[in-house]
Image: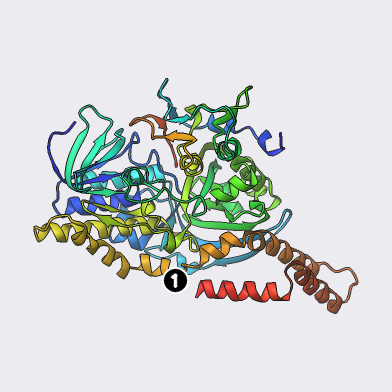
């Protein structure tokens, strides 16, 4: 193993780890990045949508050589029952701009590119290396890591924990608790390959245009969850995720849900004839603001999914990861330039910078959303989608019933399912949590 | 057996790339006579169907197809039912797309 000492060790080479390592190396710090996978990206799973703004702050000209799939021009939200979906679609030609705002990406490929940038900036990137534990001195200060390499101890002034949602090292060292099963979702995903022209025809796309479908409803069997369909250049990322606690309670299998989602009449035609080339699963932090653990301490900071930084309402994770990684690195650089030690007191600067950024402001805005959606799963993910579907079919089907009678039927079905107080209460609670 | 578990997850795992660290399972089930509710739930929750019940009614794990999501750790590590580690560096699932 490496005998020398580093200014900083970054554990993990996902979005947060790469952002941190890149920023630290560019500022001239001596950085070691450790990744347990064969290469950066080989253990990483995401939908995946990339937001340009947060990456531009790290690699302004990323569009020149980053492996991007499609820029998104259309977003579809679906509310599904077993046979139908009610959709809200937004498509705009304005998304066909010079510097598009969001793209689909394939993480294993994107992360390799990102890692190359980190290496070019001068960081030492060591893959196929699992960090086993954090090294702490008698006072609990983190002073380095122990890896599974021979003589695998390495020291550093500060360790940036970008170890992912599970956060094994931090929990083992007592820095934070294991994520609660009510605050993480398990998502499973398949990669469906189709000839480019067929994919573009099915989704009404030209050139590099892309579309996204996000769906809730009976597909999650009453659990808090969501299905997604993202278009890549020659493939579709298709998956579904639900709260771990809900899976445990219901005994549903993740692959069973995935198969049902694929067989839904609204979905089956989109993927017909595709060749599936991979099956992946990953946890997603869903607890929001209230689930954020202690973010810094003597000799360490935690960033990205490991810090549970994910905006579940807007399904944004990687941009919070990139931003928290970058801000942690900037804070470390500031402390280092003042020749101050990497103490808890000094590293509080990272939290302060994060608080002032969109990351904490957005999460704070939606702080009550997880409670509402997790506790009222049956209503929001089962009852309402079914009611909406019934209302739509009642509205569209012409069968001699008078329109007034049809309206009454629809209204009665809502009342019967949720009662007037229930309906009003749900509306108020949702509005409050959204505010 | 429910209709859902009839979905052959093995066919899905067959698509993935793995470098199996033979003889070094990164997750271990604590020896038991009667499985806890947490352990039992893993039979269904594990997305790679790594957990199975043996003829003696105990829950066993085969980690070869593990996709390293960490779900079983969230559910069954706090109760001490399983011991959870990452595979050694370079081993385990190797996502081509992720």
Q: Position of residue A230 (x, y in %)?
A: 52, 52
Q: Residue furthest right?
A: A400
Please tell me which residue is depicted at 25% across the width and 47% down the height of the picture.
A117
Please tell me whether residue A8 is drawn above or below residue A425 in the rendered image.
Answer: above
Q: Secondary structure at mark 1?
A: helix
Q: Position of residue A317 (x, y in %)?
A: 42, 56
Relative to B35, does residue A78 appear above or below in the rendering? Answer: below
**Front residue of A67 and A251:** A251
User: In the image, what residue occupies the spot 58% across and 54% down?
Assistant: A225
Left or right of A352 in this view: A305 = right
> Few, some or many C-alpha atoms within 10 Å of disc 1 (few <14, some 14-19, many ≥20)?
some
Give coordinates of residue A149: x percent, y percent.
25, 29
Q: Most extreme residue toward the top, as rendered?
A: B23
Residue at which label 1 appears: A365
Count numbered badges in the picture: 1
Q: Is residue A342 left or right of residue A253?
A: left
Residue A100 image position (x, y, % from top left): 40, 62
């Amino acid at each position: 193993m490496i005998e020398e000492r580093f200014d900083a060790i970054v554990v993990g080479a996902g979005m947060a780890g790469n952002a941190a390592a890149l920023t630290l190396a560019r500022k001239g710090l001596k950085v070691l990045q450790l990744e347990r996978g064969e290469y950066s990206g080989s253990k990483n799973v995401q939908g995946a949508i990339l937001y340009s703004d947060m990456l531009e702050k790290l690699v302004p000209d990323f569009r020149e050589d980053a492996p991007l799939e499609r820029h998104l021009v259309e977003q579809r939200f679906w509310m599904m029952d077993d046979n139908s979906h009610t959709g809200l679609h937004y498509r705009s030609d304005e998304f066909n701009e010079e510097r598009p705002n969001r793209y689909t990406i394939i993480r294993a490929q994107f992360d390799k590119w990102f890692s190359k940038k980190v290496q070019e900036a001068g960081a030492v990137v060591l893959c196929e290396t699992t960090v086993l534990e954090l090294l702490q001195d008698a006072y609990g200060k983190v002073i380095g890591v122990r890896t599974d390499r021979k003589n695998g101890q390495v020291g550093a002034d500060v360790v940036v924990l970008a170890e992912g949602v599970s956060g094994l090292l931090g929990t083992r060292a007592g820095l934070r608790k294991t994520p609660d099963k009510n605050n993480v979702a398990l998502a499973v995903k398949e990669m469906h390959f189709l000839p480019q022209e067929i994919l573009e025809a099915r989704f009404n796309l030209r050139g590099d245009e892309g579309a996204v479908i996000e769906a809730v409803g009976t597909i999650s069997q009453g659990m808090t969850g969501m299905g997604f369909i993202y278009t890549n250049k020659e493939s579709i990322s298709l998956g579904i995720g639900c709260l771990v606690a809900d899976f445990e309670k219901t005994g549903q299998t993740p692959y069973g849900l995935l198969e049902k989602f694929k067989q839904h009449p609204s979905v089956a035609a989109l993927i017909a004839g595709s060749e599936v080339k991979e099956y992946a699963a990953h946890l997603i932090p869903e607890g929001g603001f209230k689930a954020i653990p202690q973010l810094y301490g003597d000799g360490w900071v935690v960033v990205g999914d490991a810090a549970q930084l994910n905006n579940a309402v807007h399904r944004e994770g990687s941009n919070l990861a990139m931003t928290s990684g970058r801000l942690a690195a900037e804070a470390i650089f500031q402390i280092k330039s003042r020749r101050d030690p990497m103490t808890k007191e000094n590293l509080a600067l990272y939290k302060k910078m994060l608080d002032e950024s969109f990351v904490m402001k957005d999460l704070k805005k939606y702080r009550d959303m997880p409670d509402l959606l997790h506790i009222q799963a049956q209503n929001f993910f089962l009852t309402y989608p079914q009611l909406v579907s019934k209302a739509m079919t009642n509205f569209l089907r012409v069968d001699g019933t008078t329109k007034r009678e049809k309206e009454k039927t629809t209204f009665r079905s809502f009342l019967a399912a949720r009662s007037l107080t229930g309906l009003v209460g749900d509306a108020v609670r949702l509005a409050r949590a959204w505010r | 057996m429910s209709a859902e578990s009839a979905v052959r997850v093995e066919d899905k795992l067959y698509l993935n790339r793995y470098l199996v660290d033979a003889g070094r399972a990164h997750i271990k089930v604590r020896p038991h006579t009667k499985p806890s509710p947490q352990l039992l739930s893993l039979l269904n929750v594990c997305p790679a169907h790594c957990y199975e019940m043996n003829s003696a009614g105990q829950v066993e794990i085969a980690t070869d197809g593990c996709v390293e999501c960490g779900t079983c750790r969230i559910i069954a590590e706090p109760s001490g039912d399983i011991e959870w580690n990452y595979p050694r560096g370079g081993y385990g699932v190797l996502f081509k797309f992720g």
